[in-house]
Image (cartoon, rainbow, N blue to C red):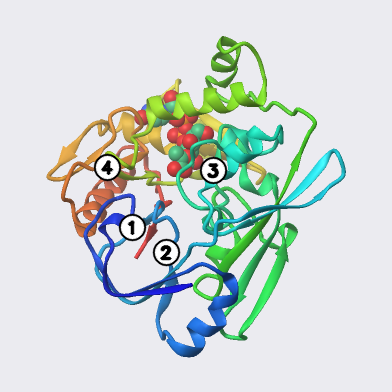
Amino acid sequence: MIRVFENADLSGRNSFHVAQRAARLIEFDKASELPEIFGQHAPERWTVLSGGNNILFTRDYDGTLLTPCGNNIEISSDDGENVIVGVEAGVEWDDLVEWAVGRGLWGIENLSLIPGKVGAAPVQNIGAYGAEAKDAIRSVTMYFPEQNNFITLAAEHCAFGYRESVFKHSLKGRVIITSVEMRLNRTPKPNLGYGDVVREVEARGGATLRNIRDAICSIRRSKLPDPAVTGNAGSFFKNPVVEIAVAERLQAEYPGMPMYPVAESGKVKLASGWLIDKAGLKGYREGNVGVHDRQALVLINTGGATGGEVIEFAHMVQRRVMEKFGIEIDTEVNIL
Ligand code: EPU
């Protein structure tokens, strides 16, 4: 089923709750409806609006937003150990995690409670608590309007990296992800190395799938604002990857500064939340926008902010971090 909304109000469709509008918004239930949508409605300018959890509209969108609504989860093979699952783009990510945990399937439990839909997960390779979606993604299926065909890309060809993928680069604006194939498994593989996870899991009685999911949900709830209550898009900035020499110079000055190893040689990742916090901005507010008081990486709409106000505030945060540390922090959120 295809549903077309003209001059659509986006305030209920983005987690920042900004009240921009789109010239047209089309919801569709089945991937097979996309050729019809492009044939009949021939949108000249379009983009995908999935759950709206990682997007900031800074102005009205003068084109067509496409929202996949298919929400089927289907096991395609099960050899007793590995279970391959096909998931439509419109499934809520956390519903998929609950589905997997409920069936004793390991692989995505550390990604519990990440807001957003499955179709958006590969785009920025969502990650948390030492796990990334790429570790469980087997392939991604998408529609290519230019060629009016569907393509399935194996994970090895998705150029996944830290909050990175081919969907943010050469395929940006060219494809609509319609489903994702995941590889889950039955052998327990607890991944408890990050922050408070071990302690929270032990407090619940040990490393079962359910305890890990509950622990992660509880940690997230204690630090991150609930988008249903306070407008936000999770981490607004990426953690910067810098030369080791730069990080060591800063660590000499700030001995407690956290840094994390990355695959790229000669580089390390710093924590933007820490940099923003130490720049004195945690909990800081200006008008209707603020830095969250329990996690400085998150910007919040305290009520009635426009996208323009949020982006101006974000630029101020970037300037302050640059002035204090000489480090550039990039936005993680997709700015439209
Ligand atoms: N920190 C501070 N002050 C703050 C926030 C953080 O000092 O206000 C310090 C922490 O104490 C810690 C370090 O910075 O030493 C890192 O903080 P944290 O472990 O909370 O993680 P993060 O790097 O700030 C990343 C992801 C989150 C994810 C967490 C947990 C990015 C951009 N963000 O945040 O993802 O939940 O790790 O794995 O990589 C999201 O993408 O929307 C998101 C919430």
| Residue 64 is at least partly visible in this image | yes
Q: Relative to residue 127, is residue 129 depicted above or below? A: above
Separation (CA) of disc 2 from disc 4: 20 Å
**Label 3 beta carbon within 8 A of ligand 1:** no
Is 255 on the left-hand or right-hand side of 299? right
Q: Please report whichever mark, 1 or 2, sits nearer to the chain's N-terminal start.
A: 1
Q: Answer yes or no: do the residues labelled 2 and 4 have beta carbons within 8 Å?
A: no
Give the Cα distance between marks 4 and 1. Answer: 16 Å
Residue at 24% x, 48% y is: 316
Quarter in which the C terminus is drawn: bottom left
Q: Which amino acid does label 3 sit on?
A: Asp
Callout 1 touching callout 2 (CB < 8 Å):
yes
Disc 2 crowd rating (10 Å Cα; few below 14, some 14-19, many 20+) is many
Q: Which tag is nearer the camera, tag 3 or tag 1? A: 3
Q: Name the residue under label 3.
A: 95
Read off the residue under disc 4.
Answer: 300
Element type where label 4 sits in the image? strand
**Left or right side of 89 for 64:** left
Identify the residue at image location x=55%, y=67%. 169
Sequence-wise, the earlier of marks 3 and 1 is 1
Q: How far apart are marks 3 and 4 (CA)?
A: 25 Å
Q: In this view, does 197 lie above or below 276?
A: above
- Please say if the residues under marks 4 and 1 sit with CB atoms less than 8 Å apart: no
Image coordinates of residue 94 in percent, x first then y, are 52, 42
